[in-house]
Image (tube, grey):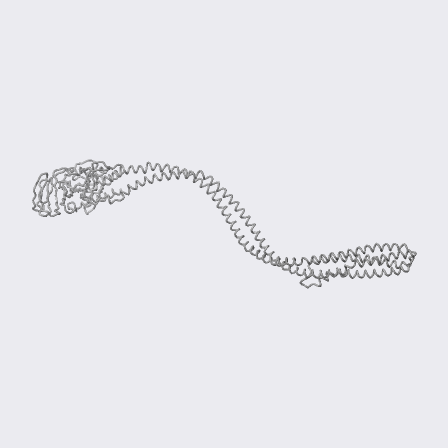
Amino acid sequence: MKLLKKTCAVTVSAAMAVGLFMGNGNVSYAAGKVEKEETVYVKLKSDGTVQDITVSDWLKNVTGTGDVEDVSNLKDIKNVKGDEEFEQGKDGKITWKADNKDIYYQGTSNQKLPVGIQVSYKLDGKDVKPSELAGKSGALTMTIRYENQETYEDQINGEKVKMNTPFLMASAVILPVDHFSEVTVSQGKLVSEGKNQILVVYGIPGFADSLNLSGDLKDEMDKKLSDTITIEAKVTDFSLGDIYTVATSEEFSDINLDDEGSINDVERAVNDLVSATDQLFSGSTGLNDGIQTLKDNFGTYAGGVSDIKKGASDLANGAGKLAKGIKKYTDGVKSLSDGANKYVTGAQKFTEGVNSYVEGEKLINSGMTELYNNTKGFPNQYDQFSQGLNQYIDGVNQIVNGNNTQALANGSSQVAGGIGQLNGSLGDLKGTVDALPQLVDSQLSEDGKLTDEQKAVLSALSQQLSSSIGQMQGAGSELEKGANTISGSLNQLNEQAPTLAAAGENLKAGNASVKQGISDIAGGISSLNDGVKKLSTNNAALLAGAKDLNENGNGLVSGAGQLKKNSKTLNSSADELSSGAAKLKKGANQLEDATGDVGKGVNQLADGSGELVIGIDRFRMEGAQKLQNEYNNTIKTTIDRFRSLTNGAGAYQSFSGKTEGMNGNVKFIFQTEGISEE
């Protein structure tokens, strides 16, 4: 279509140039050769019948030679611009005595014209002869038909074909506005000029046939460059001046397909299209296979998405619980940190208490040692007392039995006095034991007071000793009473001898109890002393442990502080994790919902892919390959024909003849007789 438009443009340009109908243009030829420019004037009757033919030839003596050889079939040849003469030879050969000048000559001819023009008329829809139109009015239809009688042969796609020699024909006529109105033309241009309208029409007769066009291309060509042109108008008092027509093949030399690089590009594009379509079909087949595989495996993917949704839900729930647990943990860390601080304070106080305890224990140990030393001789002393008492009782019995009451009374009085002294000593001892905790505590400094535990241990020991001493005092009181009774009763021994004997037996029994109590007290004091000694053996370990507790407390506080610091980050991270897990859960839900839509899309994609393969295959077979076949069989052939028409193979160079190797150019000017009442 681009070539067609260019051809139309050249044609219109040439047709507009017909306004200078009688002017001769200059044509450039290769230097060194005689050139011949020929103008053929043809007079026609109003219906197109040829009346006469006159030919004007211009021999351009480019080389400046004396004689110029030419060939011509004209009659009545005459020099029209000089007095140079010529000699007539055989086969139309003539030689001009040019004397280094150009030659202008003229002649007549009756040979067949390569092109022609026919004009027909209708008035109000009826055929009418030109001679019958003069002075008529009505709806006029004027038809101009261009004819091409000239052909040549050329090789097209390896085949010899007959082609019409291309001629551009353009006609012009003046239509006075007084006689012509509402003028329309099927192919041409109407130019207004004052009281006249200049009508210019054009055509390329036989051009469509030479291109062997068909279908839409032929229809388009018939619209743009038809051999037949129709002019319609309303006429009043019809008259028409002469119609002038110019025909030339020279204009086609201005059309060079080599300038149209797109021609070769089109051929390459068509071939590339076929190749690309084959690749597209192959690719679409592979794509369809891949989509079918995607469709077959999409269920597995959808199941995985469901698992992701469940996992995301579990993660969100777990993250929420983890965040709550971490909150409790961080609260516990805070409590631990606070407790660690309290622990350190307590450890410091404990260490101070241990130091005070050790100091108190030393005092207790010292006092206990003194108590043990003071009481360890009690059993032996009481053994001696018991022996004396037994001797006393035996003596009483002897006295009672021997009736020596006075000696017995004196002895009883002595026994009572001894027992009183013993009870006094025991009372003093009991007072010392009862005051032992207060005594020990009073000896300690204010910072080293006994702990409640220490006081409890010491109090229990003093109570045990005090209880044993109390029992001894009770037994001593009984002995004292018995001795006093014996002493008071000895005077009445005779009357109370049985009573004395019984009292003696009571003394023996009480003596045994007292002896056992003395032994128990001594053993208790000894055990207490051993226990106190054992306390002192643990003092070093207790002090070392208190020191370790105090030193480790600082590390515990530092670690608890670090835990407390890190717990803030942990708590924040747990919140972020919980928030992110919630978003993940939401995204997983959206993903599952979208997966359903994607599944539908995959199914639709699979269906569409199958249809795409079918469509591409149809396009490949019915489109690209058909286009390639059409291009190779029709368009390419048309282009080759067009190239033949424009590359000079069918150029028309002479009407009357020319010598071999001479450059030539011909134009035809037709003058069709006008119509008038005269």
Front residue of this view, candidates 120 and 22: 22
For residue 648, which quarter of the picture? top left
Q: Is residue 608 visible?
A: no
Q: Position of residue 456 (x, y in %)?
A: 71, 57
Please state if 395 lies on the left or on the right of 345 as rendered: right
Whether residue 620 sits left or right of residue 179 in the image: it is: right
Foreground of the two, 528 or 336: 528
> Residue 550: where, in percent of width, then height?
61, 58
Occupied quadrant, residue 426? bottom right
Q: Residue at x 54, y 54 (%)?
A: 566
In front: 138, or 429? 429
Give coordinates of residue 52: x percent, y percent: 12, 39
Choose top left, top right, bottom left or bottom right for residue 415.
Answer: bottom right
Q: Position of residue 638 (x, y in %)?
A: 25, 39
Which quadrant does the C terminus fall into? top left
| 190 vs 501: above or below | above
Viewer can see residue 409: yes
Quadrant of the drawing holding the N terminus: top left
Q: Is residue 472 left or right of residue 405?
A: left
Count of labels shown? Answer: 0
Q: Is residue 258 left or right of residue 489?
A: left
Residue at (56%, 51%) from the top-left corner? 326
